[in-house]
Amino acid sequence: MKIKDIQEEIVDEFSMFDDWMERYEYIIELGKNLPLIKEEFKTENNLIKGCQSKVWLQGEQNNDTIVFTADSDAILTKGIIAILIRTFSNQSAKDILDADMDFIDKIGLKEHLSPTRANGLVSMIKNIKMYALAFNSQN
C-alpha cells in the first residue's frame, strides 16, 4: 500500500470520531498494538531527541524498503509513533523522503497536542526522514 493511501485511511478513521477524547482513546489503542522494538535497540542512539517522553526508533533496510520498530514510555506517545510507523514502515526510502505530511494536519493531531508533544511529533518525523535519507544515500 502506498504512503498516500495509508494516510488517507488514517484520515478516514479519525473522521469517524466526534470529539478529541475519542480520538485520544483511539491513539492509545493504536499504541497498545505497536510491534515493540527489541530491547537491544533501546539505546541512547535510538532515543529521539526533543520528545517529552522517551521514544526509541529503529529502522532497518529490508530489500528496497525500511522497516521501523519503536517504543515509548508514555502511552499517548506510543500511539503517535504507531501512526507514523503504520504510515512509513515497509516503504522505500525515496517514497518516505517524498511523502507529504499534511495528513497530520487533516486529523488535527498537532493542534490537539501540548507544545512539547507537538515538538516530539516533529522530532519523530525528522528521525524517520533521517533514516530514509541515510538508506537512500547508500543506494
Image (cartoon, rainbow, N blue to C red):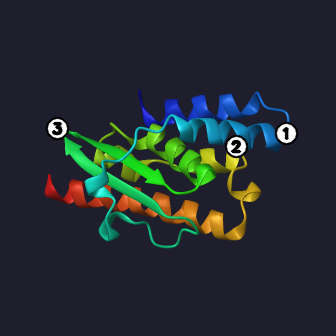
Quote the CA–CA distance across marks 2 and 1: 11 Å
Q: Quadrant of the N terminus?
A: top left
Tell me: residue 71, above or below residue 19: below
- Amino acid tagged 2: Ile
Corner quadrant of residue 136: bottom left
Quote the CA–CA distance across marks 3 and 2: 32 Å
Say which residue appears at 65% left-offset and 70% top-offset.
Answer: 116
Quote the CA–CA distance across marks 3 and 1: 41 Å
Q: Could you say whether the residue bearing mark 2 is in a helix, strand or loop?
A: loop
Tell me: residue 55, above or below residue 119: above
- Residue to which mark 3 is pinned: 63
Answer whether labels 2 and 1 touch (C-beta < 8 Å): no
Crowd rating for badge 1 (residues with CA inside 10 Å; few <14, some 14–19, many 20+): few
Q: Could you say whether the residue bearing mark 1 is in a helix, strand or loop?
A: loop
- Residue to which mark 1 is pinned: 19
- Residue to which mark 2 is pinned: 107
Judge by depth and name the residue closer to the eye, 12 or 71.
Answer: 71
* Mark number, residue 133: none
Across and down, in percent, residue 7 comes to 55, 36
Corner quadrant of residue 110: bottom right
- Amino acid tagged 1: Asp
Across and down, in percent, residue 87 comes to 47, 39
Say which residue appears at 81% left-offset and 44% top-offset.
Answer: 20
Give the mark, 3 or 2, whose residue is nearer the N terminus: 3
Say which residue appears at 70% left-offset and 69% top-offset.
Answer: 115
- Which tag is nearer the camera, tag 3 or tag 1? 1
Give the mark, 3 or 1, whose residue is nearer the N terminus: 1
Q: Could you say whether the residue bearing mark 3 is in a helix, strand or loop?
A: loop
